């Protein structure tokens, strides 16, 4: 039996469906970023985006009760730690910070104060991104991440993208339920900070009557932090970044990042395998400091039992040279190129596809998911997702209501 010829109307409808399918596929491609090839250097035709030296805009502190205060009360000075320091000391008195979602409220409080200062408000005009340093570190180091994925909530307001790390309830519980070994090894890093810092540029003289180990500056309380807020630029995107600073070096805090010091611990290097692991860790060490303009990283090498065996300083700008040319070495230029492509994806997706917000629909929030070995996927959140994001708090999307009202959207 002969087939009936298709009508012109059927052909037109079929073409329309095909066109719509192509559009959907093209849009889906625009909402993803494939994993880069890290086995070869960037082609000469690819010019890495410039990164502007960070400029500090302000600082703030968190108190022992986790109260946000706009002063330098939590500022610490670097002092030489004693050799042989035992990093398990004071473990029983450790005050942990309660695990929470990665809200940017404190950073927005700082941004609000800068905007309210006529002498500084020009420094935060035309911002492309507002983010914590930890989020930007994850973005830039993603090309070399082989194990841990992550998720962000992203929201566009008047062309500014606000990044908030999304941490599920399951992930929060995992962080709170570390086994004893993981907990102790995490504590080693905080204990090293106590041995390396003091309230003044010089360590007090030892007290022969004290039972406290020499160099110990006080029990660890993770609520206490001193944070810096900087302005920088990656490619054409102006970025406001906030992050914790461990301490400053010298007799006088200059008000800029040029005296900042980052403190880290790592297992003592006993052979090629340990060396390779440490060089891989240097990637995150580097970008954590690079993003805030921290010029120096002090690493305390420790034994498996938590005894400091050696302390070594590293100049942040010199770290890439330590790994260059070695098997499996990471390339900071590839990371910057990836970061710039990530920001372009966010602008082409979140900004370009965000509908005009109104009182009835509210703003759109997007979920960015990074999967190691795969790359980035972006989707717009639905009403159920938004309930999980807002958690019954007084928010507009991921932003606190007071900030939304303040910027007068």
Image (cartoon, rainbow, N blue to C red):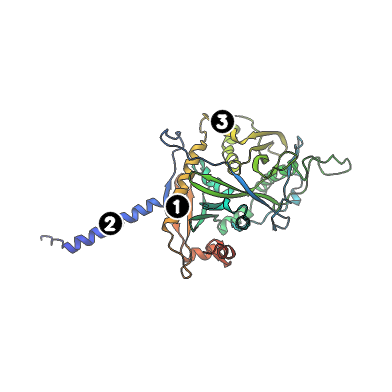
Q: Nearer the viewer, mark 1 or mark 3?
A: 1
Q: Which mark is residue 28?
A: none
Of badges 1 and 2, nearer the viewer stands 1
Q: Residues within 10 Å of mark 2 (few under 14, many from 20)?
A: few
Q: Which residue is at a point 57% across and 41% down the rendered structure image? A: 53
Mark closer to the chain start, 1 or 2? 2
x, y percent for residue 209: 89, 43
Q: Nearer the viewer, residue 175 or 157?
A: 157
- Residue 218 appears left or right of 234: right
Residue 101, position in %: x, y?
59, 57
Count of marks overlaid on the render: 3
Where is residue 340 drawn, in percent x and y?
47, 44
Q: Which mark is residue 321?
A: 3
Residue at mark 1 to residue at mark 3: CA–CA distance:
33 Å
Looking at marks 3 and 2 on the same chain, the residue that comes earlier in the sequence is marked by 2
Give residue 347's mark. 1
| 301 with respect to 342 (left or right) | right
Residue 77 picture quarter? top right
- Label 1 and label 2: CA atoms lie apart by 25 Å
| Residue drawn at the location 52% of the way across and 37% of the way down | 332
Q: Nearer the viewer, residue 63 or 373?
A: 63
Helix, strand or loop status at disc 1: helix
Q: Which mark is residue 19?
A: 2
User: Which of marks 3 and 1 precedes in the sequence?
Assistant: 3
């Amino acid at each position: 039996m002969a087939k009936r010829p298709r009508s012109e109307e059927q052909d037109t409808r079929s073409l329309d469906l095909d066109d719509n399918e192509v559009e959907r596929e093209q849009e889906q491609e625009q909402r993803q970023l494939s994993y880069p090839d890290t086995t070869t250097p960037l082609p000469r035709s690819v010019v890495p985006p410039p990164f502007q030296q960070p400029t500090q805009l302000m600082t703030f502190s968190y108190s022992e009760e986790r109260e946000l205060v706009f002063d330098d009360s939590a500022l610490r000075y670097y002092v030489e730690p004693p050799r042989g320091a035992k990093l398990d000391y004071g473990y029983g008195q450790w005050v942990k910070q309660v695990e929470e979602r990665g809200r940017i409220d404190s950073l927005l409080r700082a941004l609000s104060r800068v905007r309210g200062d006529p002498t500084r408000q020009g420094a935060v005009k035309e911002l492309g991104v507002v983010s914590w340093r930890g989020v930007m570190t994850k973005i830039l180091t993603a090309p070399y991440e082989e194990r841990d994925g992550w998720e962000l909530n992203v929201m566009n307001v008047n062309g500014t993208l606000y990044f908030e790390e999304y941490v599920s309830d399951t992930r929060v519980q995992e962080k709170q339920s570390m086994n004893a070994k993981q907990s102790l090894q995490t504590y080693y890093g905080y204990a090293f900070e106590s041995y390396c810092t003091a309230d003044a540029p010089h360590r007090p003289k030892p007290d022969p009557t004290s039972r406290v180990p020499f160099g110990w500056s006080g029990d660890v309380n993770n609520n206490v932090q001193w944070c810096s807020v900087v302005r920088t630029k990656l490619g054409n995107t102006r970025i406001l970044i906030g992050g914790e600073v461990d301490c400053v070096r010298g007799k006088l805090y200059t008000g800029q990042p040029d005296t900042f010091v980052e403190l880290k611990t790592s297992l003592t290097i006993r052979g090629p395998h340990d060396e390779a692991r440490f060089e891989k860790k240097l990637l995150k060490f580097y970008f954590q400091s690079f993003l805030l303009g921290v010029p120096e990283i002090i690493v305390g090498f420790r034994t498996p039992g938590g005894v400091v065996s050696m302390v070594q300083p590293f100049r942040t700008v010199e770290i890439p040279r330590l790994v260059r040319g070695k098997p499996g070495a990471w390339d900071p230029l590839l990371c910057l190129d990836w970061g710039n492509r990530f920001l372009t994806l966010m602008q082409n997706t979140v900004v370009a596809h965000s509908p005009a917000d109104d009182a009835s629909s509210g703003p759109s929030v997007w979920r960015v998911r990074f999967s190691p070995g795969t790359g980035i996927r972006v989707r717009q959140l639905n009403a159920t997702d938004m309930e999980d994001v807002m958690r019954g708090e007084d928010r507009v999307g991921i932003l606190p209501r007071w900030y939304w009202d303040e910027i007068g959207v």
